[in-house]
Image: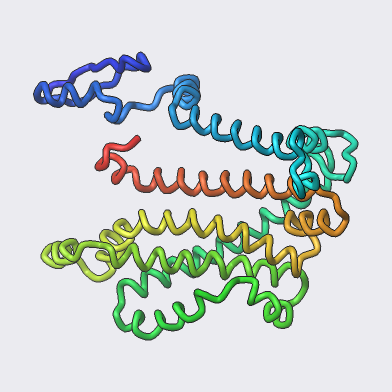
């Protein structure tokens, strides 16, 4: 196969692609053709000039503009209780914040560290327990008949409904919060892993049988790779629900963390602290989900190449 050196007009990058006919050459020039990653400067430039980044920044600008309009200019009824974004930013970056929480106070980072540790602990346990259980439910009809009704009965129960029981059965303030967070992530992980296994085409199992694969080889080479897209989608969702379940647990049973910071801001009428805690939770949730998505892309590079995605 001859190699064609095709130049991308928009980015100025040169990509080597295999081409057998003029049609392949046209594909190589298209924006959807996978490009070889450049150095960090090239990648940063590509990210900043990406259409998704552009419209995302516009969306954020509109959001904060509307927020400032209804709280700082029009001061609509009830919205006068909400701090406008400029005042909030001033408090967030102040060396001497009015309500004791900012980027320059140790308490802020202590709460972040505590909440992050709780989420990571609960999420790790949920993945370690939930992923094998989901594979077992999807792969074994006996396990599915025995256990799936129990999972489906417990799954709809809201995580906060478990708080009283967790406080009664578990010691201290940490274990109840981690347990509530764990439950939320656990059922999401189980269900998405189960759906991933069930979505695998039966022809793959027949092909593995014809090749003489043992049951263990089928698990390693067919079931797990085939379920990975669903598993990592479930992990991203599980991380999100873990964060909001964590806040619920910290509001009720916790004595520290971002959830407690929000509740303490409510009781002390420290409204900027409420929004600082909420925005911090949003940033942490986004970053943790993005990290999982990145790991998933690395582990499923074979599938990304098949789909022609970058």
* Residue drawn 29% across the image and 44% down it: 302
Q: For the point 80% across and 47% down, which residue is it?
A: 81
**Res 276 visible:** no
On the image, the x and y values in percent for residue 170 come to 71, 78
**Residue 105 picture location, percent across and down:** 84, 41
Quick check: 7 above or below 192? above
Quadrant position of the N terminus in the picture: top left
- Which residue reaches farthest left? 21
Q: Would you say 304 lies left or right of 1 here?
A: right
- Residue at 73% x, 63% y: name it: 250
Q: Residue furthest bottom?
A: 146
Tell me where residue 300 appears, x and y as whole percent.
35, 47
Relative vertical location of residue 137 with respect to residue 93 in this rendering, above or below: below
Looking at the picture, how far across and down is residue 15, in whole percent? 29, 21
Tell which of 1 and 165 is nearer to you: 165
Residue at 34 percent across and 84 percent down: it is 145
Q: In the image, is residue 50 above or below residue 6?
A: below
Question: Which colouring convention does the figure follow?
Answer: rainbow
Q: Is residue 277 visible?
A: yes
């Amino acid at each position: 196969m001859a190699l064609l050196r095709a130049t991308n007009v928009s980015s100025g990058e040169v990509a080597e692609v295999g081409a057998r006919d003029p049609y392949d050459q046209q594909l190589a020039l298209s924006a959807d053709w996978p490009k070889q990653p450049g150095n960090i400067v090239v990648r940063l430039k590509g990210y900043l000039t990406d259409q998704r980044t552009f419209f995302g920044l516009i969306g954020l600008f509109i959001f904060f503009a509307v927020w400032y309009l209804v709280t700082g200019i029009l001061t609509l009824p009830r919205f006068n209780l909400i701090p406008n974004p400029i005042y909030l930013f001033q408090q967030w970056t102040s060396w001497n914040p009015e309500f004791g929480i900012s980027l320059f106070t140790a308490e802020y980072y202590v709460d972040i560290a505590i909440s992050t540790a709780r989420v990571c602990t609960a999420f790790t346990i949920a993945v370690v327990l939930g992923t094998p259980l989901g594979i077992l439910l999807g792969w074994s009809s006996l396990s599915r008949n025995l256990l799936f009704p129990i999972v489906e009965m417990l799954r709809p129960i809201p995580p906060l409904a478990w708080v009283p029981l967790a406080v009664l059965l578990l010691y201290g303030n940490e274990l109840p919060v981690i347990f509530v967070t764990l439950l939320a992530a656990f059922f999401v992980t189980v269900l998405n892993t189960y759906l991933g296994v069930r979505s695998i085409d039966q022809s793959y199992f027949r092909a593995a049988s014809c090749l003489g694969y043992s049951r263990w080889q089928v698990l390693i080479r067919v079931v797990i790779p085939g379920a990975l897209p669903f598993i990592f989608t479930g992990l991203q969702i599980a991380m999100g629900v873990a964060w909001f379940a964590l806040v619920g647990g910290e509001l009720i049973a916790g004595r520290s963390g971002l959830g407690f910071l929000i509740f303490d801001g409510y009781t002390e009428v420290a409204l900027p602290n409420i929004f600082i805690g909420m925005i911090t939770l949003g940033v942490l949730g986004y970053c943790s989900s993005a990290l999982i998505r990145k790991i998933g892309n690395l582990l499923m590079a074979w599938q990304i190449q098949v789909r022609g995605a970058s």
